[in-house]
Image (tube, rainbow, N blue to C red):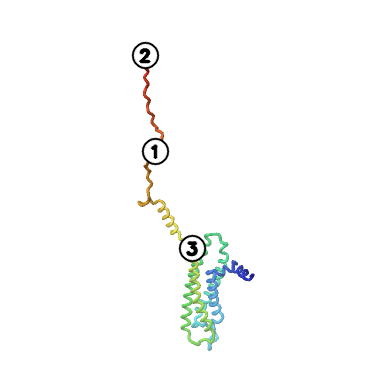
Amino acid sequence: MRVPESLQDLADREVVQFLKRPKTVARIFGGVFSLIVFSSLLTDGYQNKMNSSQLRCVLNSNNLACSFAEKAGFLAFLSCLAFLALDAHETHITSTRFKMAFQLLDFILAVLWAGTWFVGFCLLVNQWRHSPPKEFLLGSSSAKAAITSAFFSIIAWVFQACLALRDLQHEFPIPYKHSLDEGSAVLTTLSPPSATSPVKMPTTGPNSLSSASSAPSTYLTPKAPSLAMMSNN
């Protein structure tokens, strides 16, 4: 009986709940794909030809393509680590402005990284298609791994951008929408009653007449002067 309780306690911990968040999973996958691109091209991305000892990029001997992918992978990996650390301390952030700036920066960087990986994927595929077959003895598997990881990096960063936009709209609603809602509420309050709405009229009935008759009269009736009879002596 203790095993389910311990598993339940483990599942209820803050670390496990943090790792189960969709944003955390997306950042982890984005960091892993970026690390694969960086490490695969750094280790086996540069090879020498059979007739030369100079190291060249396995992607059509274009060192610019390998350098671009390496730098993008390294910076994207660092970006994922930084945002994971900020997400872990997000509950301790009390400033509304700082939280809004953080989520806005998260959305902007996610969109930029998605665009960067799209450009990098197209560049790597183009250079790989123009690479002569069997030009290098090694490095083909590393190039394929980098291309595949670059493609999945696009999906990971697009998903992060969608999550950041959803959080931004959920926690900080659009100002003009809020003002429009308040204006409609004011107009609804100040609008005149419609023709179908009942209008209370003063009731005229026996009860009202009795109440009117029972009310004391404010006019005083003048008394007739009394005439004294004078006796004739």
| Closest to the observer, 17 or 163 | 17
Rendered-image quadrant of the N terminus = bottom right
Q: Amino acid at mark 1?
A: Ser
Q: Earlier in the sequence, mark 1 or mark 2?
A: 1
| Residue picked out by circle 1 | 210
Q: Amino acid at mark 2?
A: Ser
Spatial separation of the CA atoms under disc 1 and disc 3: 63 Å
Give the number of the disc on residue 231: 2
Is 215 on the left or on the right of 138, as rendered? left
Q: Residue at point 63% right, 71% down? A: 3
**Residues at badges 1 and 2 in contact (C-beta under 8 Å)?**
no
Spatial separation of the CA atoms under disc 1 and disc 2: 50 Å
Observer-side mark, 2 or 3, equals 2
Is 221 placed above or below 69 here? above
Q: Secondary structure at mark 3?
A: helix
Q: Earlier in the sequence, mark 1 or mark 3?
A: 3
